Amino acid sequence: MELPEDVLTETESLGSAWASDLDGSDGDTSPCRDARALPQPKVPVHFMEVFSNPRIAPYVSGLGMRVGPSIDLGTGWNLALRSCQNHLLQLLAVLQPFVLMLSPPCTVFSQVQNSMKNRRKCQRTWKKHYEQGLLLWRFALCLFKEQCRQGRKAVLEHPWLASSWALSITEEVANTPGVFQTIFDQCLLGLVTTAEQKPVRKRTRFLSNLQTLEICFSTRCTPETCSHLPVEHAWLQGREGGASRCRSAQVYPADFCRGMARSVLNYTNNVAAPALPEAQVAPADDADSEADLPSPAS
Ligand SMILES: [Zn+2]
């Protein structure tokens, strides 16, 4: 897959700046796992997650399916860098995940950030942060489109009201045949604040082409569906137990991960195994080839 030129150009300029902010490096020297150094399976993997530490993958693996490495800053991948993006594209071409989960950072697109838009002390710093977030969102959309193009499945997750959903680049992908959106509340999947254990609604949206998504990923919290009444939802603002409530809520609750793992299992149970990656398919010898051909008389 070739990345669009505008993504590459932005990646080169913004990625370097971001890497410097993160680790004091001069740019493209940030560590990135080399795809060639990773073990290559003999058959494609069922699941892989990007912009995420291992969260859902262990649950998918627990159901007996194969998973690829979880790709995130925390696992050595700075996807703001062009080199890391290219390594990931190479890795995906080898592993060919049946289902790809994409959870790009949402901070700059959040409602809180949007409400502060005109009250910031330094608009320049904000603009830089926004462009960094936009760069990662665009790359996530590129990965989503590539999964669709290859006839595979993808799930892209962001908060329900994130401004990223209204971007024209997002709408273009959302209008792809076979792609749909679902909205659900994470309180129904057990999301609670860390210290007080209060339910957090965190309404979330998926963009996906995976038809086997479990019903929990299209269920909102209403008096009919609520599992925590009479306890009300906690606001995702401020701190609790020394940690930001908003940051704590970025970790998917266990039922979210279980639901995604079952969704992947439902899909893989009903799909024929895709072809092996080209490089790993041993060429058949002439005798075998002829044996597979129908005879001229048939
Ligand atoms: Zn609720």
Image (spheres, rainbow, N blue to C red):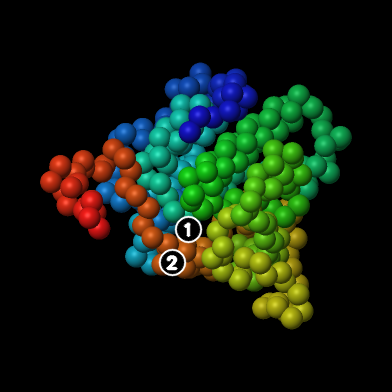
Q: Residues within 10 Å of mark 1 (few under 14, many from 20)?
A: many
Residue at x-position 68% and y-position 64%: 184
Local SS, label 2: loop
Whether residue 93 is visible, yes or no, is: yes
Residue 163 is situated, as x and y percent measured from the top left of the image, at 76, 44
91 relative to 194 in the view: left or right: left
Residue 276 is situated, as x and y percent measured from the top left of the image, at 32, 47
Q: Is mark 2 within 8 Å of ligand 1?
A: no
Q: Residue furthest front?
A: 297
179 relative to 32 in the view: left or right: right
Whether residue 23 is visible, yes or no, is: no
**Quadrant of residue 5 within the rendered picture:** top right
- Residue depth check, mark 1 versus mark 2: number of the one nearer the observer: 2
Identify which amino acid the numbered label 1 is placed on. Ile
C-alpha separation, residue under disc 1 versus residue under disc 2: 20 Å
Residue 43 is situated, as x and y percent measured from the top left of the image, at 30, 51
- In this view of the protein, which residue sits in the foreground, 91 or 224? 91
What residue is pinned by disc 2?
Answer: 270
Looking at the figure, which quarter contains the C terminus? Answer: bottom left
Local SS, label 1: loop
Residue at x-position 15% and y-position 42%: 286
Q: Residue furthest left?
A: 287
Residue at x-position 60% and y-position 41%: 141
What residue is pinned by disc 1?
Answer: 56
117 relative to 200 in the view: left or right: right
31 relative to 3 in the view: left or right: left
